């Protein structure tokens, strides 16, 4: 992930000002700017941004959300795993997303659509720890959308597997 | 209403039921097994499907292809670093991490397990893992060293570039292979399921069919049972006979429509009622109930299954009527039942009674006719007797030729008339059934020769020769000689009548049968005109006549062969006949007679009878009321040199007989004042001088019953009017011989046994008597004797010699005779002695003998009474 250039920063600031202006009354708490390396950028139909057109999160910001843990097996790993992360819904709510669907994009530009109104959405977790350890990029990290596969059959479908995107770094809300 | 038990077949149906049960059990088990199998397979299938869904196959393929993508991206990133230097390093590091994670994923991922089963793919993956492990030190190391090594990395990657490519391609193949296996497995399961399901479905269909068929059969059966039930019911209802069904306790369980009519009772009222209380007359009820209570089986009851019985039943209105009942026993589910078929036979009985009356009336009418004929014969034969006798007497006087011709004509005509009357009377006698003419021992040859001699003059007139072909056992037989003679006479005279200038042959053949019986076959063959086939059929019927071209006089009565037929039948013989028109006829008969051994009167002796006695004439009394007949008979007798006395009626006859001793008395039967029978008994029982004289009846009364009556009255025999001189001479000759041989026949002394002791009863005599009468008549006769004996004994014991010698002697004589007949030997001896005492007028001896006789009579009476009761 490259650091935002001066130009983009400037544009982002301008945009932010505009949006701040437009939604002063609505947004009580403005989204803080990331201090560390940005691991996730959310664009599209969102209310809060901290760059010109996107909400950028570093790991600390993500850690700040209420954490959820899943203990489950996956088809990609051997043995039971413990995932810790933030629910996708919590994350999207925090930036006031107003869409029906998101596009989740990985570092290798793999992308997948996740509808926000189907019954598997509630299980979608943006995991950042596996078995108590932060996930490196070589280890499908740093962010991996996982589901509680063991808990319900509905999470053991091809669709859900395809939505279990790892090395997640971008989201577009539509 | 199944009255009939379904005996047998129980074991067979048991076996059938058991095998059916086993069959059903096995079927059920198979069905359940099949369904279980389907369930099991379905579970297996669904788990396979779930597996397929949860472990997506193409994921592995995707992952492998992504390795290639990541590898190429890393290579491009390498080039970027080589071109741009340090600024491109983060991008390189990112793609290295992605590449690293991709290779790593194949190590851990579940869907990638199959890759490691393929040694080539495993090796390729291992090469990439090694590459990662080598590179990771550089990538994680300082930038400058990484930069310096970048050309090396690029070269290394180029060398390794084929590995991700082949891994990707291999993945496709692997996936295809894997999919095939999976598909095959599923197809196999599906096929098995389909197979098992098909089997189960077929089984179910079969089961359904079976159940359906069973149900249909059941329906048909129950329909049949209903039909049979209806049929039975209809039969019951439609039967003309009353049908009453009773259970083992005697309660009525069924009562059909006819029964309602016959007994006048309604079905609803009698069902459940006791049979004895409803249709049995009161007097039979207790017997019926006792019978029902003791009933064990049809055989012992005497009523059930015994065929038709005639019983009495009672109608609802109380009147009793005769019924014909047939009761049979049957077994139903409720136990023993009795089915009675009952028919009201009141009408039948009435009809039978009417028929019986009609028959009796017919018989009476027939007897009336017989009586009429008997009277007629008498009325006709008496005047005829006068004519014939007059003609015979007239001939003795000198006549002119012309007169002689007329006398002959008149004689011939009256003989024909006499024959007709005789024919009719013979038929009448034969039909009355009283044909028992006395059996005699006779020689077949003598009879035949005599007959031919008699017939020869007749044959000579026709210029016909008469031949005897005697091919018979020359024996003497016991039989009805008179009847055989008559049959042959009729046959011969017929044959001669129809044969002119020809030959008539009497053929006699014989054949031995068992027990000294001889079957005699007589046949009369002629060469006459013959009889047409048509006429042959009726030739033996009465009043059938045929025209004879040779007969000079009027036709016959047509009764000749009718008499023959009757006579032969009465002897148990058989007729045979045949004829060809124009060639001649054969008429004959066979009769089986017992052969008798022993002497017979020779022909010569018998021949003498026809001649008048040349020795001194007999003293004869003729008792006859008709003056003409009296005169004629007298003339005949006097002509033969006899001394004749006359009496005009019974009284006079008795009187004359008592005063004179006659050699013979000829007694007319029908006379005024005292008839012949009465006169005979009076003479016989009197002390008159002619009391032992033989008396002959002279009468036109020819009925056998009357002849028996004559014999009973003590008559020796009977001369039928009109009197034939030959017959008269025969009898008189016999009498004169007897009187010469022994003047008064001495009664044989009572037989003594070996010890000289006379037995109370002569067993021999009683046996003879019993043979003569037969057992039934014997009892009757003995009882008559006992009654008679009681009467005579009273006279014998109650009359002293001094009081009335004659009465005592007469009664003693009579009693003695009876005792001789009934074998009372001891008593007879005593009575004979008593009779002698009477004659000698020895009163003392008589008294002692009277007492002895009374004592012996008591013993005799007790003994006879004991034997013949």
Image: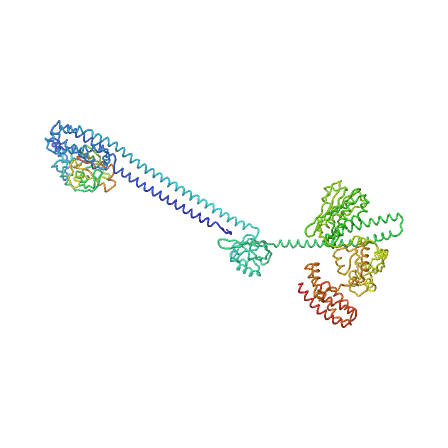
**Residue B822 in the image: above or below residue A142:** below
Residue B764 higher or lower than A133, as above or below:
below
Task: Residue B793: give x, y in percent of width and height.
Answer: 73, 68
- The reply to whether residue B723 is in sight is no
The image shows residue B112 at horizontal and vertical percentages of 23, 35
Q: Position of residue B792 (x, y in %)?
A: 73, 67
Q: Nearer the viewer, residue B131 or A148?
A: B131
- Residue at 60% x, 54% y is B345
Residue A48: image quadrant is top left
Looking at the rendered structure, the number of numbered marks drawn on it comes to: 0
Looking at the rendered image, the quarter that the C terminus of chain A falls into is top left
* Residue at the far front in the pictured view: B755
Q: Which part of the image, by quadrant, shows the N terminus of chain A?
A: top left
Q: Nearer the viewer, residue B381 or A9?
A: B381
Q: Could you tell me if residue B492 is visible in this image? A: yes
Q: Is residue B417 left or right of residue B569?
A: right
* Residue B235 image position (x, y, % from top left): 54, 49
Is B94 drawn above or below residue B481 in the view shown? Answer: above
Residue at the top extreme of this rendering: B83
Colour scheme of the picture: rainbow
Of the pair B344 and B498, the residue shown nearer to us: B498
């Amino acid at each position: 992930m490259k650091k935002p250039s001066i130009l983009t920063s400037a544009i982002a600031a301008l945009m932010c000002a505009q949006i701040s202006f437009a939604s002063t009354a609505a947004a009580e708490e403005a989204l803080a700017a990331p201090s560390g390396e940005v691991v996730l950028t959310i664009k599209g139909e969102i209310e809060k941004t901290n760059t010109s057109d996107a909400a950028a999160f570093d790991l600390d910001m993500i850690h700040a959300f209420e954490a959820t843990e899943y203990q489950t097996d996956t088809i990609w790993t051997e043995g039971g795993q413990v995932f810790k992360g933030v629910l996708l819904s919590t994350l999207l709510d925090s930036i006031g997303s107003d869409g029906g669907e998101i596009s989740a994009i990985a570092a290798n530009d793999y992308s997948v659509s996740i509808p926000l109104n189907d019954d598997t959405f509630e299980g979608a977790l943006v995991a950042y720890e596996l078995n108590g350890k932060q996930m490196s990029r070589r280890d499908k990290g740093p962010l991996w959308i996982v589901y509680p596969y063991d808990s319900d059959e509905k999470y053991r479908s091809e669709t859900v597997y395809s939505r279990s995107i790892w090395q997640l770094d971008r989201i577009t809300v539509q | 209403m199944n009255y009939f038990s379904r005996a047998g077949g129980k074991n067979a149906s048991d076996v059938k039921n058991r095998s059916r049960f086993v069959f059903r059990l096995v079927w059920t088990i198979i069905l359940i097994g099949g369904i279980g199998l389907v369930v099991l397979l379905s579970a297996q299938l669904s788990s396979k499907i779930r597996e397929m869904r949860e472990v997506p196959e193409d994921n592995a393929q995707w992952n492998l292809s992504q390795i290639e993508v990541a590898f190429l991206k890393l290579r491009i990133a390498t080039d970027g670093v080589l071109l741009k230097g340090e600024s491109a390093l983060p991008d390189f590091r990112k793609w290295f991490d992605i590449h690293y994670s991709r290779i790593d994923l194949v190590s851990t991922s579940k869907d990638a397990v199959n890759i490691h089963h393929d040694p080539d793919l495993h090796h390729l993956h291992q090469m990439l893992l090694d590459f990662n492990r080598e590179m990771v030190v550089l990538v994680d190391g300082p930038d400058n060293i990484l930069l310096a090594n970048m050309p090396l990395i690029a070269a290394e990657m180029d060398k390794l570039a084929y590995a991700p490519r082949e891994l990707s391609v291999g993945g496709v193949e692997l996936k295809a292979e894997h999919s095939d296996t999976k598909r095959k497995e599923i197809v196999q399961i599906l096929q098995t399921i389909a197979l098992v399901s098909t089997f189960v479905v077929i089984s179910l269909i079969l089961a359904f069919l079976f159940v359906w068929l069973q149900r249909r059969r059941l329906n048909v059966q129950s329909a049949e049972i209903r039909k049979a039930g209806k049929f039975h019911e209809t039969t019951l209802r439609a039967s003309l006979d009353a049908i009453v069904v009773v259970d083992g306790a005697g309660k009525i369980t069924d009562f059909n429509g006819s029964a309602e009519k016959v007994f006048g009772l309604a079905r609803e009222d009698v069902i459940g009622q006791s049979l004895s209380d409803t249709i049995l007359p009161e007097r039979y009820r207790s017997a019926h109930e006792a019978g029902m209570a003791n009933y064990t089986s049809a055989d012992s009851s005497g009523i059930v299954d015994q065929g038709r019985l005639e019983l009495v039943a009672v109608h609802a209105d109380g009147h009793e009527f005769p019924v014909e009942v047939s009761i049979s026993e049957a077994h139903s589910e409720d136990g023993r039942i009795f089915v009675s078929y009952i028919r009201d036979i009141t009408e039948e009985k009435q009809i039978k009674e009417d028929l019986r009356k009609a028959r009796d009336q017919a018989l009476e009418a027939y007897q009336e006719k017989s009586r009429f004929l008997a009277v007629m014969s008498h009325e006709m034969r008496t005047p005829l007797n006068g004519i014939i006798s007059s003609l015979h007497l007239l001939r003795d006087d000198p006549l002119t030729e012309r007169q002689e011709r007329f006398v002959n004509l008149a004689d011939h005509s009256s003989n024909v008339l006499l024959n007709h009357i005789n024919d009719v009377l013979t038929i009448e006698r034969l039909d009355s059934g009283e044909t028992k003419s006395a059996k005699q021992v006779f020689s077949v040859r003598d009879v035949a020769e005599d007959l031919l001699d008699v017939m020869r003059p007749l044959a000579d007139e026709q210029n016909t020769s008469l031949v005897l072909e005697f091919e018979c056992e020359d024996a003497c037989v016991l039989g009805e000689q008179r009847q055989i003679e008559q049959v042959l006479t009729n046959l011969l005279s017929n044959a001669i009548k129809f044969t002119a200038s020809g030959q008539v042959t009497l053929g006699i053949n014989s054949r031995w049968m068992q027990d000294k019986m001889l079957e005699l076959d007589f046949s009369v063959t002629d060469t006459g005109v013959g009889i047409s086939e048509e006429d042959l059929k009726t030739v033996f019927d009465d009043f059938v006549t045929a025209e004879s071209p040779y007969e000079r006089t009027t036709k016959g009565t047509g009764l000749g062969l009718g008499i023959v037929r009757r006579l032969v039948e009465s002897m148990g013989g058989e007729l045979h006949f045949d004829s060809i028109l124009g060639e001649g006829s054969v008429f004959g008969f066979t009769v089986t007679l017992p052969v008798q051994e022993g002497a017979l009167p020779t022909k010569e002796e018998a021949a003498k009878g026809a001649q008048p006695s040349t020795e001194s004439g007999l003293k004869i009394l003729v008792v006859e009321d008709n003056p003409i007949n009296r005169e004629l008979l007298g003339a005949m007798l006097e002509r033969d040199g006899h001394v004749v006395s006359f009496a005009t009626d019974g009284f006079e006859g008795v009187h004359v007989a008592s005063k004179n001793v006659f050699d013979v008395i000829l007694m007319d039967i029908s006379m005024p004042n005292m008839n012949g029978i009465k006169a005979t008994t009076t003479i016989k029982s009197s002390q008159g001088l002619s009391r032992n004289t033989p008396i002959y009846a002279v009468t036109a009364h020819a009925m056998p019953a009357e002849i028996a009556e004559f014999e009973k009255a003590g008559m020796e025999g009977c001369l039928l009017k009109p009197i034939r001189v030959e017959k008269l001479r025969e009898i008189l000759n016999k009498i004169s011989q007897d009187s010469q041989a022994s003047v008064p026949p001495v009664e044989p002394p009572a037989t003594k046994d070996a010890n000289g002791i006379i037995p109370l009863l002569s067993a021999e005599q009683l046996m003879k008597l019993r043979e003569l009468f037969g057992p039934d008549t014997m009892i009757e006769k003995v009882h008559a004797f006992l009654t008679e004996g009681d009467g005579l004994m009273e006279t014998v014991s109650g009359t002293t010699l001094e009081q009335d010698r004659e009465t005592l002697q007469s009664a003693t004589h009579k009693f003695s005779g009876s005792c001789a007949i009934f074998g009372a030997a001891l008593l007879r001896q005593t009575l004979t002695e008593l009779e002698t005492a009477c004659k000698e007028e020895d009163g003392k001896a008589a008294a002692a003998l009277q007492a002895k006789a009374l004592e012996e009579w008591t013993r005799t009476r007790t003994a006879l009474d004991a034997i013949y009761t």
